[in-house]
Image (cartoon, grey):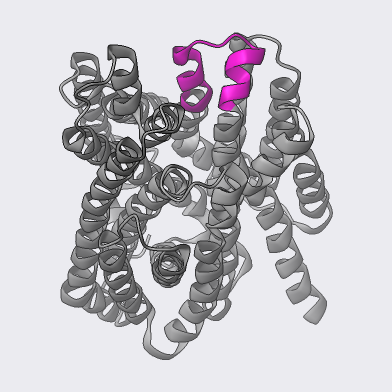
Amino acid sequence: MEKQNNRRWWVLIGLAIGLLAVGLDMTILNLALPTLATELQASSSDLQWFADAYTLVFAAALLPAGLLGDRLGRKKMLIIGLLMFGAASVVCAYAETSAALIIGRAMLGLGAALLVPLSMSLIPVLFAEEERSKAIGVWVMANAVGIPLGPIAGGWLLNHYNWSSVFWINIPFVVVSMVAIALLLKESHGENSARADYVGMLLSSLGLIGITYGVIEAGESGWDNAEALLTLGAGAALLAGFVWWIRRSQTPLVDPQLFRSAVFTWGSVMATLISFIMFGLLFVLPQFFQGVQGTDALGAGLRLLPLVGGLVIGSKAADAIQQKMGAWAAMAGGFVLLAAALTLGANTSITDGYGLSAVWITISGLGIGLVLPAAMDMALSALTAERSGVGSALIMALRNVGGTIGVAVLGTVLSRSYRGTLDVTGLSEQAAEAVQRNVAAGAAIARQLNSLPLLTQVQNAFVFGMGRLLWICGGIAAVGLLLVVLYLRKAKERASAGQHMDI
């Protein structure tokens, strides 16, 4: 029995190692973009597609990947996902053209779409309720820690090796994870007697692509961009069609009864809100460290370590709080910490040192660490082992959309606040355009012109925009706290009494 218990945890560690590669890959490429622009003669559009190809394929494949795991076997599809992720990393590393790299990035997105939801779907299969919150904490840490570690690893690799190293780093993680899963994990299936819902797959995939691409385009070109609005509208219409379809289909891709479970719905909502906040922070902080505090990319990554430390401590604390008081208490405490930390961060000035930033960033990590595992645990508690693949994929799809919207909306707020505060009178047209582009370009022009007043203005404009962004994130945290207190605690109590709909 003890050997079986140990095997479960070793499987989870193997999955966590694979997930770490996925998290690293989400942010590590950003540092290599200037090099890729030169080495591959990539245009601005190519650079955008290096990131977007991954994001779009990941969004599109999540729900079908969950269904495939339930029907064909989770172990089998996880190994296929790891093989695909490893092969895609090799394709990217050997790419000699922008088109080849975009294809490789799309393959990485497909591999990640198999790995992330299916690794999460195994938690209800492997772990009983009393162990599940601890297992979720490990899963969340592996999923989230790789994102801020990406700039650190990328900065070090680019300082010592060429750009292909940011893809070769994936291979050891993939090999270790694959060996652990192949040797230790037993195969598990869900309900595979029903026919596959191809209409649901098509509608959900195209709808998620439309929403994701539309939000990305709006973040790049503005929310009045016709292409962005049309794509968003088409994506929303397709997802509405998907909801209509699954309510009438005899074998739907996603069982609509799932949303009659209050704990699943509210757990998913909380996880989506926290993804909005977390991706917003990871978007703004590297720019702040480099443009205002003057660090390089590696230094910016290192300065994110307090976020990682807070996340690790918060995840461990969440497990203890859940055991004693319930998931709602961990989430309430996390949102309180987040609201306080983001309020402190919103009042940052350019004269404040890193010490103040480290304090509120650490507290933010603690808050995220308390909320995210508890929210995921709550949502997963509504899933049976048979339907955990599609259910986990649905949670991840909602989180992915929340994070993407967070970056686009908050990026727009930051950009407009920054540009609206600048005064570029007296600068040449070329210099003014560069200064208005972003804080890094603005600081570079100011240093090139040896103009301290311009540098101060650029940094103040960015910090003003960052303050607005953090106030919005703080408001989201306050809304999350209100929802937890008013609704989620009661939902969990009803679920404990057996009044929710079991799936």
Q: Residue at x 33, y 44 (%)?
A: 459
As drawn, 300 above or below 408: below
Quadrant of the image occupied by residue 80: top right
Q: Residue at x 57, y 42 (%)?
A: 297
Place of residue 125 in the rendered image (x, y in percent of width and height, measured from the top left):
59, 62
Quadrant of the image occupied by residue 376: bottom left
Horizontally, residue 285 falls left or right of residue 123, namely left
Range of residues picked out in magenta: 33-52
Where is the C terminus found, in terms of image quarters?
bottom left
Q: Nearer the viewer, residue 379 or 273?
A: 273
Q: Nearer the viewer, residue 271 or 497?
A: 271
Asked if the magenta segment contains residue 43, the reply would be yes
Asked if the magenta segment contains residue 335, the reply would be no
Q: Is residue 17 visible?
A: yes
Horizontally, residue 452 falls left or right of residue 21, namely left
Q: Residue at x 71, y 54 (%)?
A: 17
- Counting every numbered tag in the picture gives 0
Q: Residue at x 24, y 38 (%)?
A: 418
Magenta: main secondary structure equals: helix
Q: Is residue 68 visible?
A: no
Place of residue 464 in the rendered image (x, y in percent of width and height, measured from the top left):
23, 49
Place of residue 129 in the rendered image (x, y in percent of width and height, measured from the top left):
52, 76
Horizontally, residue 296 falls left or right of residue 78, namely left
Q: Nearer the viewer, residue 415 or 263?
A: 415
Place of residue 66 in the rendered image (x, y in percent of width and height, measured from the top left):
51, 42
Where is the N terminus found, in terms of image quarters?
bottom right
Horizontally, residue 199 falls left or right of residue 87, namely left
